[in-house]
Image (cartoon, helix red, strand yellow):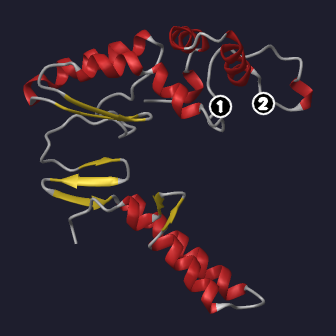
Amino acid sequence: MSNFYPTIKHCKILEELQKKISNPEIITFIKRSISTPTVSKSHLGDEESTIGVPQGLSISNILASIYLLKIDEQLKDYPNVAYHRYVDDIFIMCDYQSVEDISNNVIRKFEEIKLVIHEPNGDSGKSVLGKIDEKFDYLGYQFKGGLISPRTTSIEKLKDSIVSIFTSYKYAKDKNKEFLLWRLNLRITGCIFQNKSRGWMFFFLGINNE
């Protein structure tokens, strides 16, 4: 999806929330949270916004999921279709002969709630139609046939972050090798925090291309 969070319509999401939440105080609190503009003091007189959900809110992802709940249910019910969505990244598997029809139908459904899907096979490269044995990227992974790898940009980001750690160590007044190793291990191997696995290697446990 293109520009997802800033284009979520408040009226639509509040309508869905009212079906699930009977307490008006909670609805009012959520409405204020998403409609209060976060601008400088010179714009404090601006009207409350009626579109867009700030990504910094602790409830942003939950609100986004509720906003797309109907579409998720409809697309998951499509026969001979496997539909997956993580926030604003969508992955659909279907018969190749049906790909154009399904793509057009998906675009129409999102347009109904004023959301825009990147043009399939367009210049942005963010939306692609193709066969499953062709190379494609999804959620930081690269898939090609039966091989699963971190995509090139994911690897480059890791390299850049490691270089940054060494650069910080190089110019530090008090060089601490133990702290350097701790930072490298944390960045590469990761850790378990609050019963959740975090870090590069934990995220890419699904790779099978050595």
Examine the rendered structure and indicate whether residue 37 appears above or below residue 132: above
Between 128 and 149, the one nearer to me in the picture: 149
Examine the rendered structure and indicate whether residue 134 appears above or below residue 205: above
User: Which SS class for mark 1?
Assistant: loop
The kind of residue on which mark 1 rests is: Pro
- Image-based side of 205 in relation to 9, left or right: left
User: Which SS class for mark 2?
Assistant: loop
- Image-based side of 202 in relation to 114, left or right: left
Q: Which residue is mark 2?
A: 38
- Name the residue at 41% across, 9% down: 112
- Name the residue at 26% across, 62% down: 207
Say few, some or many: other residues with alpha carbon within 10 Å of mark 2 (under 14 / 14 to 19 / 20 or more): few
Q: Using the numbered discs, state the Cα–Cα distance from disc 1 to disc 2 in whole angstroms.
A: 9 Å
| Callout 1–callout 2 Cβ contact below 8 Å | yes
- Name the residue at 41% across, 59% down: 153
- Name the residue at 72% across, 86% down: 171
- Image-based side of 157 in relation to 201, left or right: right
Looking at the rendered image, the quarter that the N terminus falls into is top left
Mark toward the start of the polypeptide (1 vs 2) = 2
Indicate the position of residue 83 as horizontal and vertical percent values. 25, 30
Q: For the view shown, which residue lies furthest in the right direction?
A: 42
Between 44 and 28, the one nearer to me in the picture: 28
Between 53 and 58, the one nearer to me in the picture: 58
